[in-house]
Amino acid sequence: MSQFFVLEGVEGAGKGTVLSGLIQRFSARGTDLVVSREPGGTPMAEEIRDVLLAKRNEVVAPDTELLLMFASRAQHLSERIKPALAAGQTVLLDRFTDASYAYQGVGRGLGADKVEQLERWVQGDLRPDCVLILDLDPQVGLARIQANARATDRLDGETLEFYQRVRQGYQARAASAPDCYRVINADDSPERVLDAAWTALGEFIE
């Protein structure tokens, strides 16, 4: 039976590390797993990702950013996610629509209505079985990025206040539907964060 899981979180929360660990644990279980990311996941969607995240002199309008996110998502769903689920595979994504609610809806101030309209149009009734949100003080996350000298993109260059709004957006999403969201404290050792994430997913894995 197919299942659909998503990993979300603010910048510097350690999604990459947790994702790698989850892949290893799913593999050990023999799960038929499809792993992908957003924006991106298909050749066209990755081209849109490049446009979205490239550093540029012009200011990207929030509406443009949101529409590009959903353009990438529409292609990703059509070409990769829906076929995988139809084939009975388990899908694990690095970000999905909750990121649009948090980053564009709250962070950019566009509000939930615009995101909801696009979500209904692009996704229909499709929703993840579980969304894991790695929760972290954005100030700690930004310090981690600087300490690790991680390559940055356009969305990494926002203000602390922006990332604080994004965090609030994620927290509001989790509070709105506690049955399918699990908030993980990411201010801990990588091993403990991974264990907590895997334990949370264990409630949903069939």
Image (cartoon, rainbow, N blue to C red):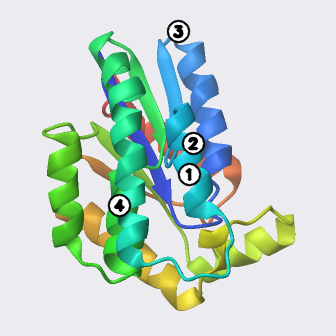
The residue at the point 40 percent across, 76 percent down is 62
Label 2 – label 3 distance at C-alpha: 28 Å
Which quarter shows the C terminus? top left
Dot 4 alpha-carbon crowd within 10 angstroms: few under 14, some 14 to 19, many 20 or more: some
Mark 3 touches mark 4? (CB < 8 Å): no
Q: Is residue 77 left or right of residue 26?
A: left
Nearest to N terminus: mark 3 or mark 4: 3
Q: CA distance from mark 1 to mark 4?
A: 12 Å
**Kind of residue indicated by mark 2:** Glu
Q: Amino acid at mark 3?
A: Gly
Query: Of the residues under marks 1 and 4, which one precedes in the sequence?
Result: 1
**41 w.r.t. 184: above or below:** above
Compared to residue 110, the image places residue 34 above or below, namely: above
Residue 107, relative to residue 131: is it above or below? below
Snapshot quadrant of residue 152: bottom right
Q: Which mark is residue 30?
A: 3
**Residue 178 can be seen, yes or no:** no
| The N terminus, quarter of image | top left
> Where residue 166 appears, x then y in whole percent?
43, 75
Q: Residue furthest front?
A: 58
Q: Position of residue 47 (x, y in %)?
A: 58, 45
CA separation, marks 4 and 2? 15 Å
With 160 as the anchor, is 8 left or right in this view?
A: left
What distance separates the C-alpha of mark 3 from that of mark 4? 37 Å
Per the image, the residue denoted by label 2 is 46
Mark linked to residue 49: 1
11 up-or-down from 206: above or below: below
Check disc 4 and report the residue beneath it: 67
Mark nearer the viewer, 2 or 3: 2
**Residue 178 in the figure: left or right of residue 140:** left
Picture coordinates of residue 55 (x, y %)? 69, 71
Q: Residue at x 64, y 25 (%)?
A: 24
